[in-house]
Amino acid sequence: DTEVTQTPKHLVMGMTNKKSLKCEQHMGHRAMYWYKQKAKKPPELMFVYSYEKLSINESVPSRFSPECPNSSLLNLHLHALQPEDSALYLCASSRGVDTYGYTFGSGTRLTVV
Amino acid sequence: SQQGEEDPQALSIQEGENATMNCSYKTSINNLQWYRQNSGRGLVHLILIRSNEREKHSGRLRVTLDTSKKSSSLLITASRAADTASYFCATRMDSSYKLIFGSGTRLLVRP
């Protein structure tokens, strides 16, 4: 298995809703990432988990809450989002730091109404 | 935060021609990577070049790295319509897990 699987592919939520994005990989990668990408912009790093521990939080608002239940799963819990949070949310994983690239999922396209 | 700028922002070429994209970055790096993204979906890793390497090849791709100028280039030879996509460079600083993407180049290959 050489994929990162993200669910759902599309999500529409209201500003008072609570929802979660899910990400799964079975490649034995020990680092996992959340990126946010707005239209025609590059991906922006949100969170990094290394060995199931949060190692980087890029000053992301608390309405985004990451969770890494085990080495294969990564969740992003969403609560009280704003319309400007509408974006493509990408999950990625990597084996190491120096030699390997990232494997990205196909993303969740989130619309906040 | 965005580490680098890519040039050009958009490129339109005829099938069979070569495409060259350039990336400049600001701080010292551990490695530099190139990714392709089709239609706003997931990114695909193309090639990684370490800071002590100057050139790397993979199929029709050739990447160069000039650390003194803090710049890299991606050359796609004999382009195909299927190469139409956005291309991003991304840099990793030191041994951090932080990978920061450049602004991207949108490539259109006309049949």
Image: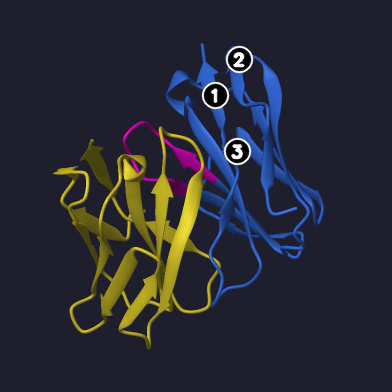
Check whether the beta carbons of the residues at disc 1 and disc 2 lie within 8 A of each other: yes
Asked if residue A39 lies in the magenta stretch, the reply is yes
User: What secondary structure is found at the residue carrying circle 2?
Assistant: strand
Q: Is residue B62 left or right of residue A64?
A: left
Q: Residues within 10 Å of mark 1 (few under 14, many from 20)?
A: some
Amino acid under label 3?
A: Ser
How many dots with numbers? 3
- Front residue (pair A34, A55): A34
Identify whether A76 is placed above or below B97. Answer: above
Indicate the chain coloured yellow by its letter: B
Residue located beneath label 2 in the image: A13
Q: CA distance from mark 1 to mark 2?
A: 8 Å
Task: Point out residue B61 in the picture as x, y percentages from the top left corner.
Answer: 34, 64
Residue located beneath label 1 in the image: A110
Identify whether A24 is placed above or below A57. Answer: above
Task: Point out residue B17 in the picture as x, y percentages from the top left corner.
Answer: 17, 52
Q: Chain of mark 2?
A: A
Indicate the chain coloured blue by its letter: A
User: What secondary structure is found at the residue carrying circle 3?
Assistant: loop
Asked if residue A25 lies in the magenta stretch, the reply is no
Q: Residues within 10 Å of mark 2 (few under 14, many from 20)?
A: some
Q: CA distance from mark 3 to mark 1?
A: 17 Å
Q: Please tell me which residue is depicted at 57% across the width and 38% down the height of the picture.
A: A106
Q: Please tell me which residue is depicted at 43% across the width and 66% down the height of the picture.
A: B47
- Front residue (pair B80, B73): B80
Magenta range: A35-44
Q: Chain of mark 1?
A: A
- Image mark for residue A49: none
Closer to the camera: disc 3 or disc 1? Answer: 1
- Image mark for residue A62: 3
Respond whether the residues carrying marks 3 and 1 are from the same subunit: yes
Identify whether B55 is placed above or below A56. Answer: below
